[in-house]
Image (cartoon, grey):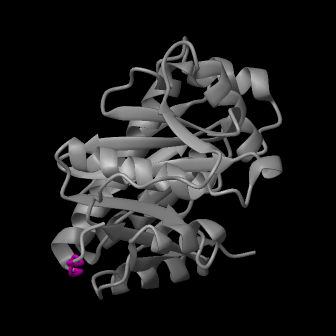
Amino acid sequence: MSQAPLVPSAELLRRVIDAECGYTASRLSVLERLPGNPVGVASRRVGEAYAFRARHLPISSFNRVVGLTDANAGDVGPLIAWFAEADVNGRFEIAPGGHAQAVRRALAAAGWAHSDFHATLFGAPGTAQNPAMGVSVEVVDAGTLEAFLDAYAAGWAVTEREGFKANVRGWLGQPGWTLYLGRHEGQPAGAAILHVSNGVGYCADSSVDPAMRRKGVHLALLHRRSADAAQAGCDLICAQAAFLSTSHRNMVRAGMALLYSQAMWTRAA
């Protein structure tokens, strides 16, 4: 990482939101292209905000509104209805900054509540680092795609593994994407994705097989993506993690800093 840290700003926050949501849109497009759109993918823009919906995939990151501000607070009701018509539990993610007071009031009036936080980290791309002993990281190609998908599924505890793999083989070759396979002593151990757009490298979806954790694989995947983002001409990298999780701490070890914690709003019980 660069020795001179980036200074948080509204502009950086906007770039990070755009990068993260750009990755989500790209990932959902792979599912949307499946014959008949079986997952029921839909998306829309509301001002500067992003809204995503995956009717038959009840994962929060695919059913959410990100970045809604008071300029579009009147859209809270229609967006809630948009989720309801697909019978999905949506989520509104609100970044700090004082531009969503009317949004919060509208959500509260509709019976929604602040239920959690999630950390967003950022930093300047760095240079290549030597991984821990026995750890290596490689870019995935057609010959290693299955090993990557198996490592990814193990790390994220995917239960329907073959169905998952069939749905996401289109990740390889997706514009702006690079897939990475981490190994320990030559064995597949972890997986990660780098999505590059508009000078921002988004470090996405890193996972490590539980049997291979605490060996330096996750940190090595971060360092490799940071260095590759620099090589791709990025001036900014970012990532998300559960606050104070192992992923969060490894991102700090890799030179990233907390940019903000977004507030998650969900329908109150």
> Looking at the image, can residue 61 be seen?
yes
Please provide percent x and percent y for residue 10: 20, 77
Tell which of 33 and 210 is nearer to you.
210
Image coordinates of residue 226 in percent, x first then y, are 35, 53
Residue at image point 51% right, 49% down? 221
Which residue is farthest front?
133
Q: Does the magenta portion include 112?
A: no
Residue 144 vertical placement versus 50 (above, below): above
Q: Residue at left 37%, top 33%?
A: 177
Above-or-below relation of 224 to 47: above
* Image position of 176 (left or right of 198): right
Q: Against 88, is 214 above or below? A: below
Where is residue 158 shown, x and y percent of the image? Answer: 77, 39
Work out which quarter of the rendered image holds the N terminus and state it: bottom left
What count of labels does the image hold? 0
Name the residue located 72 percent from the left edge and 61 percent from the top edge: 214
Question: In this picture, which residue range is highlighted in magenta?
Answer: 4-8
Q: Residue at x 51, y 59 (%)?
A: 80
Is 3 displayed left or right of 183 in the figure?
left
Q: Say which of 205 and 24 sits in front.
A: 205
In terms of image quadrants, where is residue 36? top right
Across and down, in percent, residue 56 comes to 67, 35
Q: Main secondary structure of the magenta part?
A: loop
Nearer-the-camera pick, 217 or 80: 217
Does residue 45 show up? no
Q: Looking at the picture, tell me which residue is in the foreground, 157 or 94.
A: 157
- Quadrant in which the C terminus appears: bottom right
In the drawing, does residue 120 fall left or right of residue 232?
right
